Image: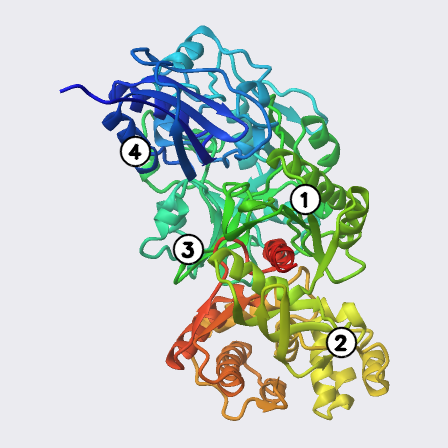
Amino acid sequence: MTKTMVCQNIRVSGVVQGVGFRPFVWRLAKELGLGGWVRNDSRGVEIEVCGAALQVQSLIERLHQDAPPLARINSVVARDAALAAHTGQDFVIIDSRSGRAATMIGHDTAVCRDCLAEVFEPSSRRWRYAFTNCTNCGPRYTISRGLPYDRARTSLKPFVMCPRCQQEYQRPEDRRFHAEANCCPKCGPQLFLLDAEGHPLPDDPLARALALLRQGKIVAIKGLGGFHLVCDARNAVAVALLRERKQRDEKPFVVMLANAPSAATFVQVGIGEPGLLTLPTRPAILIRKRGNCDDALPGVAPGLAWLGVMLPYTPLQFLLFHEAAKRPPGMGWLERAQDLALVMTSANPGGEPLVVGNSEALLRLYGIADAFLMHDRDIVTRCDDSVARITTSGLQFIRRARGYTPRAIKLPIAGPSVLALGGWFKNTICVTRGDEAFVSQHIGDLDNAAVCDFLEENVAQLVKLLGVEPAIVAHDLHPDFHSTRFAAEFAQQWNLPLLGVQHHHAHAASVLAEHGIQGSALALSLDGVGLGTDGAAWGGELLRVNGDTFERLASLAPLALPGGDRAAAEPWRMAAAVLHRLGRTNEIAERFSAQQAAPAVAQMLLGDINCPPTSSMGRVFDAAAGLLGVKAVMAYEGQAAMLLEGLAQRYGEVLPLDQGWTISKGQLDLLPLLAVLADEKNAERGAALFHATLIAALGDWLRVLVPGEQTVIGSGGCFLNQVLVRGLHTRLSAQGMRIIEARQVPPNDGGLSVGQAWVAMQHLASR
C-alpha cells in the first residue's frame, strides 16, 4: 500500500532556544525517517518536514510529549508546505534567522550530573574545568545578548571552539550538539586569582582561594549573574569581618553547602526537601535550624529560626567543595556530608546593584574582599540568586531571580503589550507579550541612583528582547517613587497612556493573574505599607477586586505612625503608639529610656504632631515586637516580624486570647491583644499568643464581613509568615473558605509589577 506523503511547516513557541530543542528535533526526524530542516529564529523554532503522513504526525505529537527537560512549549502550530521541497532528502539543522522576537531566552540552570562526572574524572579533558556545560545545563540568560540564541549573541563569542569541541557541537548524537556555550580548558574561559590590589596570585586559583577562605579571608567569586562575597561560615571572626566590611550588621547570610546530607547538619531537612534543594533552578531555601546551628555557624543568621541554604550550581562552586575534599575521583564523595560551609552573599555594597565586571569588582569591592577569584567570560545580565521558603503547597518565592528569570507567567487572556514598573521596595518590572507576563530579575530597593539606573536598563533590555512596543505604562500611586517618575518619563517619550494602580489592588491582582482568575474576587492584602486612594498609609485591607477596579470593604483600625516613615524602621515607636491608645502615654519615656527620642515621641502623640494614621498589618507586627522587647530598632526591613515569627515557631501552639479583638464598622481592632502583650514578660509566649490571636481575629473578621464567601486571595508581604499562613489555612478551611496565594512570584513587593500589568491589561480590554 502506498504511503501518503506530506510536508508540514511547524512553528514551536515558548522557551525553545538554548535548551537542546533543535538537536532533539533532528534526532526525532532521523528516527522517523523524515527529511527537512530545523532552525532558530526570533519567534522560536521553525521546522519544515516531509515524509509519510503518520510519521509527520508522530513528530508533531512528540514535540510536546518528549521535549527536552529545560524546554517550555507554549504552542505547536503546523501548516501545509510544498510537497516536493524535501521529499527523500536528509534532515538538517540550518542557520538561524533573526527578526521580531516572539520567543524568549532560557533561564540559567545548575550544572548537570553528566557534566559534573567529567569535571571530577581525572582522565577527562574537562577534569576540574570550571566552565563545563552542555545542552542540558549551564548559563543562558546571563550570557545572552539577544535572540535568536546563538554563540555569536553570547559572551562566549570571543572563545573560538577548538577542533574537539567543534566536533562535539556538530555531532548529533552528542549531548553538546549545538550547545552554544560549549568549551573546554583549551579553548574556553579561564580562572585566575588576584589579591586585594588586583595583582595575580601564583599557584592553582581554586586551591589558593580555598586556602585563603580557611585562613579567615573574604574572597569575591565571580558567579553566573554577578559576584559573591564568600567566607568560611564556621569562622565567627570571618563572618563578623564580612558584616563590618559590607555594613550588614544583622541581616542573615545564605550558606552554601555541598549537598543535602551536609545541610542536615545544620537544618531540619524534611521529607521531600532534599529534592527542592537540588532543583535545577537552585534557589536559596529557608529551612528550620537545628538547635546547634547558631553555635556551629556563629553570626550567620542571628536570632532567626530559619537558615538560608543553597547548594552549588556552577562547576566553579562544586570545585571549591571538591578541593576541600582533597580532589577525590568520581561522584561518590558528593553523596556524603562535607565539612566546608561557605557564606555566599551578593556582592552589592551599599544596596547597589550586583557587581558583574572584573574591573568593576576591583573598584567597588576594594576594602571588602581580600582576594578575587575571577574569569574572563563576561556576565551580560546581572541576576541575583533566587530565595524561597518551603510551605505546605511547595516553594514560595521571597526573591525571584536566577533560575526563574526570564521564565514567562501564562495569563488567562492575551492583549496589547504592557510595561509595569513595580514599587519602591524589592523592585521588579514586568512586560507582557500576548498572553505571557515576563517579570525581571530582582532589581532592589529604589533608594540609590545606581539601582534606579539598573531599573531603567532592565526596561530597555526586556522590551528589546521581547520585541514589543508597550501600549500602556502602569505604576504605583505613590508620586515620589522613582518607578512612578520613570513611568511618566517613558510614557511621555513614547506618547503612551499612564495608569496608576493602587498598591494593594496590585498585590491581589498579581495572584489573580498567575492563577488565571477573572471576574470579581475577595482579597486580603496584608503588608507593610502602600499609598491608599485617600492618601493614607494602607496595609491591612479587605478588598473586592474586579478587573481594573476595586472596592475597599474594610481595613484594620488605624494606629499612629509617630515620626511618619521613621516609625516603619523603629518598632518601639509603634509600641509607643499602642501605649498612647491605651491611655498609658506617661509610660513611654521610662519604658523606652534607651531611645533618646522617647520623651519627644510621647509629646508628638499627645499633640497629634507628625503622627499620620496607618492601617498597616506590618506595623502591628512591629508594635507587638516593640511591646515584647524583641526589637526596638530594625537593622533591615521586616526584621522585627521575622524575629517574632521565629519566637512563635520555637514556643509552639497556644490558644488565642479570648476577646483579643473587636470588629466595629467593618474595622478589625487588635488593641485588646496588644494591651495584653504590653504586660507580657515572656517574649516567646507573647509571640505565640500574638500569632494565634491574629489568626483567630482574621478568621472572625472574614466570617462577619463576608459570610458565605468560599475563596479569598491572600497577598502582601505578611503572607511570607508561615506561622500566620499555616494557621489561616487551618482556620479558614474550618470555616469553609480556602486561600489562594502567590506561587510564581513573591507575595511581597517583588510581585507587584505583575499585578500592575494585569490591571493595565484589564483596563485596556474594558475600553
Image coords of residue 338 (percent x, y): 39, 40
Q: Earlier in the sequence, mark 3 or mark 4?
A: 4
What type is the residue that disc 1 sits on?
Pro
**Mark 1 residue element:** loop
What type is the residue that disc 4 sits on?
Arg
Q: In this figure, which residue is indicated by the disc labeled 1?
A: 470
Q: Is residue 647 or residue 310 the one in the foreground? A: 310
Q: In this figure, which residue is indicated by the disc labeled 3?
A: 267
What type is the residue that disc 3 sits on?
Val
The residues bearing labels 3 and 4 have C-alpha atoms spaced at a distance of 42 Å
Please state which of the two labelled residues, at mark 3 or mark 1, is closer to the viewer: 1
**Mark 3 residue element:** loop
The residues bearing labels 2 and 3 have C-alpha atoms spaced at a distance of 38 Å
Is 187 located above or below residue 550 in the figure? above
Query: Tags 3 and 1 in contact by the CB under 8 Å rule?
Result: no
Residue displayed at 53% across by 93% down = 659
Q: Is residue 223 visible?
A: no
The residues bearing labels 4 and 2 have C-alpha atoms spaced at a distance of 60 Å
Q: Which of marks 1 and 2 is nearer the N terminus?
A: 1
Q: Is residue 278 or residue 300 the one in the foreground? A: 278
In the picture, the quarter occupied by the N terminus is top left
Is 738 located above or below residue 57 in the figure? below
Q: Earlier in the sequence, mark 2 or mark 3?
A: 3
Image coords of residue 150 (percent x, y): 53, 21
Please state which of the two labelled residues, at mark 1 or mark 2, is closer to the viewer: 1
Image coords of residue 53 (percent x, y): 26, 26
As drawn, the label of residue 62 is 4
Residue displayed at 40% across by 82% down = 735
